Amino acid sequence: MKKLEMKNKKKAITGNMMTYLMVILVFVVVQFMVSGGMISSLMQGLLVPLCIYSIVAVGLNLCVGYLGELSLGHAGFMCVGAFSSAFFTKCMAETGMNENLRFFLAILVGTGVSALFGYLIGIPVLRLRGDYLAIVTLAFGEIIKNVINVMYVGKDASGFHFSLKDKASLHLAEDGKMIIDGAKGITGTPHQSTFFIGAVLLLLSLVVVFHLVNSRSGRAIMAIRDNRIAAESVGINITKYKLMAFSISAAIAGAGGVLYAHNLSTLTALPANFGYNMSIMILVFVVLGGIGSFRGSIIAAVILTMLPEVLRGLADYRMLIYAIVLIAMMLFNWAPKAIEWRQKIKNKIFPKKAEEVQ
């Protein structure tokens, strides 16, 4: 039993290290290609979004793959992280604070506020399961988006002013300035998101989730996923561990939102940015990459984000090829014959060592 446990632990550590090395290697290669002028400006513009979607996919995979709960609200948590961090940045813009320190604090603010929302939403929502949970979390994402679209926040010498009616009802002084302007969102956010920061946040997200799933808390979370009644019967606090996983998952999505906000000069809560299509797209990354596989989620996010841009020159055939790739990836990951074939290839490349006879 102890030998099997050590073997599983060694396998997990090896898998984790391979994921870290994959991210670092890709970062180094891409940086080398950028410095050598081998990547077009269009593809360079995709580097930060690739990191954003990879981070959010890792967060959602923690919820879907390890907690075993289907959430469609991660676009909402991403929206919360984006707007809370952009709001902080705008408020601190005239304080003379160092830009790097301000951005670091904005990351903490966006991640922390998203975790708080995840905790507060999770208290009533995690009592539901399956399709019911998916519908409620989807509704949460839509509520967040629509509330922000009717929110007006300004600041003058007397302090902050808030309204859900219109800009005029704020009654700002002449020296006042708008921070959130309803459907126009937040404008003038400094462009501070870089590929380097995105890669660092992705690695930090992986460190957090790997540490969690390989810890005692992670084993409790997976026990709840596998058999809730049995886990409860041995004394595992169901609510505590479900809230823990859901809040961490929301925080990681919020970190992706911070990068998103600081990669654009104008941040708006439009359906194209934080609508249900975004939640579905992130879920597609998780499913195609393999539920429970963080490395697979990253690979799927990168491929499916780059593919439409790579195929842009094919005009009408672009989405057809995209759909074919989706089907092919689904079959490759989940078809029984494909799984059997991958296992055979793996055994040939990494032959199993003969077990010692005790």
Image: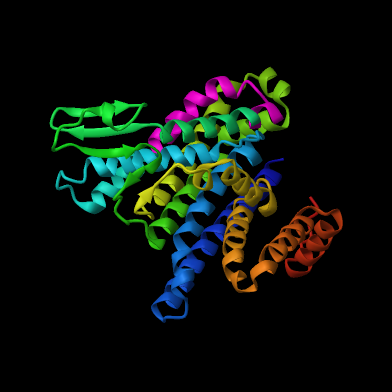
Q: Is residue 268 left or right of 307 when viewed as pictured?
A: left
Which quadrant would residue 136 be assigned to in this image?
Answer: top right
Q: Which residues are magenta?
A: 111-134
- Residue 237 visible in the snapshot: no
Image spot of residue 333 (x, y percent) = 75, 56
Q: Is residue 351 left or right of 144 when viewed as pictured?
A: right
Image spot of residue 23 (x, y percent) = 51, 62
Q: Residue at x 61, y 65 (%)?
A: 307
Q: Is residue 325 left or right of 106 when viewed as pictured?
A: right
Give the residue at the far front of this rendering. 168
Residue 341, compared with residue 262, is above or below; it is below
Image spot of residue 102 (x, y percent) = 25, 47
Count of marks overlaid on the render: 0
Q: Is residue 120 magenta?
A: yes
Foreground pick, 15 / 165: 165
Q: Is residue 275 left or right of 191 when viewed as pictured?
A: right
Image spot of residue 325 (x, y percent) = 72, 63
Report the colour scheme. rainbow
Which quadrant would residue 124 be assigned to in this image?
Answer: top right
Which quadrant would residue 218 be assigned to in this image?
Answer: top right
Q: Residue at x 58, y 52 (%)?
A: 13
Secondary structure that dominates the magenta span: helix
Foreground pick, 28 / 45: 45
Q: For the N terminus, which image quadrant? A: top right
Q: Is residue 233 magenta?
A: no
Residue 176, compared with residue 235, is above or below; it is below
- Residue 106 visible in the snapshot: yes
Foreground pick, 72 / 239: 72
